[in-house]
Amino acid sequence: MLRVLLSKTFEISHGTRKPILAMEGLRGFAVFLVFLVHYVSQALPLVGDAGWSGKIAWGLQRYGHTGVDLFFVLSGFLIYGSIIEKPRPFLGFMRRRVVRIYPTFLTILAVYVALSFVRPESSRIPEGLGAATIYLIQNALLLPGIFPIEPIITVSWSLSYELFYYLVIPLVVGALGLRQRSRLARVLFFFIVSIGWLLSADHIGALGYGRLVMFVSGILLKEALDAGLGPRADLLGLPALAATVVAVLYGEAHHLGGEWRFGCLFVGFLILCLAAFGRDGFTARVFSWTPMRWLGNMSYSYYLVHGLILSVVFIPLGSLVEGKDLGVVAFWLFLGPMFLLTLVGSAVVFLLVEKPASLGKPKPRSHPGP
């Protein structure tokens, strides 16, 4: 009975034809990585010098940052897939993206603004009506991220990247006539773009623009799947994921540049997703695990709200244990309950805002587009 209730609540692929279930699981995996980043950053200072456990936590936090990169790959795949298959009116396409993003985002933004009045010492809103108004408008327009503006919601910088991709990719596909080109020509074009961007992005500025290349990884994923390469990659999926862990941690330890990091993730996540989207293979079954898929289905709500929940809990907890060394055990004991709290809070936002306002009733469709 409980499973039926949970299924009705957190399944969003009903009514679709051939949904890629592993994609939902990959979203869940990606958002859990993001959770680890913020959990470690807030929990580790409370437990003092954690020795080897602290080094493990350091690794979890460093690799956790790749959760956003995986989201970008999945977005690159979905949006490019919907654009390349048939022409779509630009305004209609952007309207659907706004409906998908803004109801939940504006709800959480309003909560942050309200909390700025409750805890002004933690507020990022500048003093003065004019400066505050401009800053709020900048955040509402999702400018922090692509532009050097500190966001009110820490993680919302990535939405700026997403919006940039939504605006650019339809124009690129249309202006260059990519639908009329051969698959080989499209692959070569995006491959050259990727190489050029990786080699130049680090010199453009310190805003992490190199991350934009992950959208192109998703584009090449779409082309590879359409070419029938998914089943051939099945056994490479989990080894590719493991390789990204080793590569990222090695790069962090040796202070290698963005070219190394994003180049490794570009290839590793492409192979991982290619294997997972093969539908019937081992990698697909791993990422089709139902609880992981349900987390993935509410991942947008979770992404926006989990940091706030962690702060609400850790701020008073920090005052309570100030000056005390709780030790390694406390760090790991807190992880499960904190994750559960973020799940509950995110589920509330998903059920009350995201699902009714942005998802609605699924309509049958012939492709796994957005």
Image (cartoon, grey):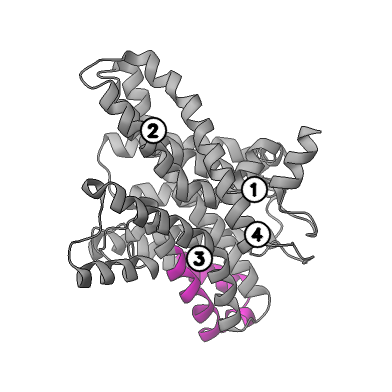
Residue highlighted by disc 4: 356
Circle 2/circle 1 CB separation < 8 Å: no
Q: CA distance from mark 2 to mark 3?
A: 26 Å
Q: How many neighbours does mark 2 have within 10 angstroms: few (below 14), some (14-19), or many (20 or more)?
A: few
For image coordinates 38% across by 38% down, the residue present is 312
Of the residues tagged 2 and 3, which is closer to the observer? 2
For image coordinates 56% across by 74% down, the residue present is 185
Residue highlighted by disc 3: 102
The image position of residue 211, as x and y in percent, is: 39, 57
Q: CA distance from mark 3 to mark 4?
A: 13 Å
Residue highlighted by disc 1: 24
Q: Which residues are magenta?
A: 162-191
Q: Secondary structure at mark 1?
A: helix
Q: Is residue 289 visible?
A: no
Q: Nearer the viewer, residue 10 or 245?
A: 10
Of the residues tagged 4 and 1, which is closer to the observer? 4
Q: CA distance from mark 2 to mark 1?
A: 28 Å
Along the polypeptide, which appears first: circle 3 or circle 1?
1
335 vs 119, left or right, is right
Q: How many marks?
A: 4
For image coordinates 71% across by 53% down, the residue present is 12
Q: Secondary structure at mark 4?
A: helix
Residue highlighted by disc 2: 313
Q: CA distance from mark 3 to mark 1?
A: 21 Å
